[in-house]
Amino acid sequence: MIPLIDSLSSNFLPALLTGVSVDFEIAGIALALGLALGVLLAFARSQGGVAGIGAGLIVGLMRAAPTFVVMFFLLNTLPRGGMSGIMIVAVSLVPYAAAYVADSAVDALRQLHSGSPLICLLILPNIARAFFVLVMSSSAGAAIGVPEGVAVILRQAEKMPSTGNTLVVFVIGVACFGIPLHAGFALMRLIQRHLGRVALRKQEGALTGRKMVTAK
């Protein structure tokens, strides 16, 4: 078996790290736009009435929108050079991101209004999961020539002389994606726990204050 180091392309790791950063950039843009739109839709849905019905219909349509269809629609309708490949992929992921955020935010608002801020904080790990899905979905950009990480891994895997070396390439790719994603998810969990402790202390303080007033 040819040693792995000899069978890897000299620019594989730099290209992989650059590609992974492109995936994260696409996911970050999509999530930021999805948060802005999803929160607005969630507020509209929580109000009910005509606005709530309209927002619900929009969320349903976005939830069903295939990323590839949206991506190629943008690619074929926008003026050439009007939007970069990275932005086209990011915008094509916005319907999913906005629908996911809207669904999660509606539940969070209900819990908040019902006096359950701790349960409301569950939206944080949900958003982290959405980012994870968006990073993986950004590999759709390879179809329009965006140099993202999964495409780099597959190109290198095709050049490997043995199945064992191919598996090692995939392991390297999984590590490059998985380590920062799981680190971010762990950080989000820590933030959730911290905010949960703060909310719990406030609840206990408010309850103690009411008891003191009642005792007087």
Image (cartoon, rainbow, N blue to C red):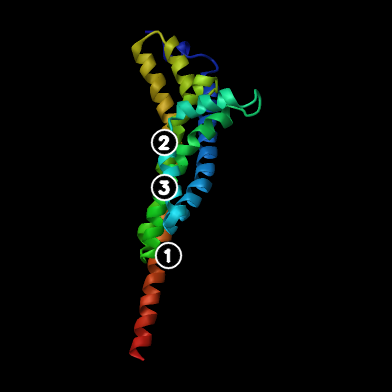
Question: First in sequence: mark 2 or mark 1?
Answer: 2
Disc 3 vs disc 2: which is toward the camera? 3
Q: Could you tell me the amino acid type at mark 3?
A: Gly
Q: Counting other residues with Cα less than 10 Å from the Cα at mark 2, is it few (<14), some (14-19), or many (20 or more)?
A: some
Q: Is residue 97 visible?
A: yes
Q: Earlier in the sequence, mark 3 or mark 1?
A: 3
Residue 113 locus on image (x, y percent): 39, 64
| Up/down of 25 relative to 153, above or below | below
Mark 2 near mark 1, Cβ–Cβ under 8 Å?
A: no
Q: How many marks?
A: 3
The front one of 186 and 26 is 26
Q: Amino acid at mark 2?
A: Val
Q: Quadrant of the C terminus?
A: bottom left
Quarter of the image holding residue 205?
A: bottom left
Which label number is shown at residue 198? 1
Q: Percent position (x, y) of residue 142? A: 50, 21
Can you say whether 51 is above or below 176 in the image? Answer: below
CA gap, disc 3 to disc 1?
33 Å
| Mark 1 nearby-residue class (10 Å; few <14, some 14–19, many ≥20) | few
Q: Read off the residue under disc 2.
A: 133
Residue position marked by numbered label 3 in the rendering:
56
What is the CA distance from the residue labelled 2 to the residue labelled 1? 29 Å
Give the image location of residue 13, x and y in percent. Answer: 51, 22
The residue under the point 54% across, 15% down is: 10
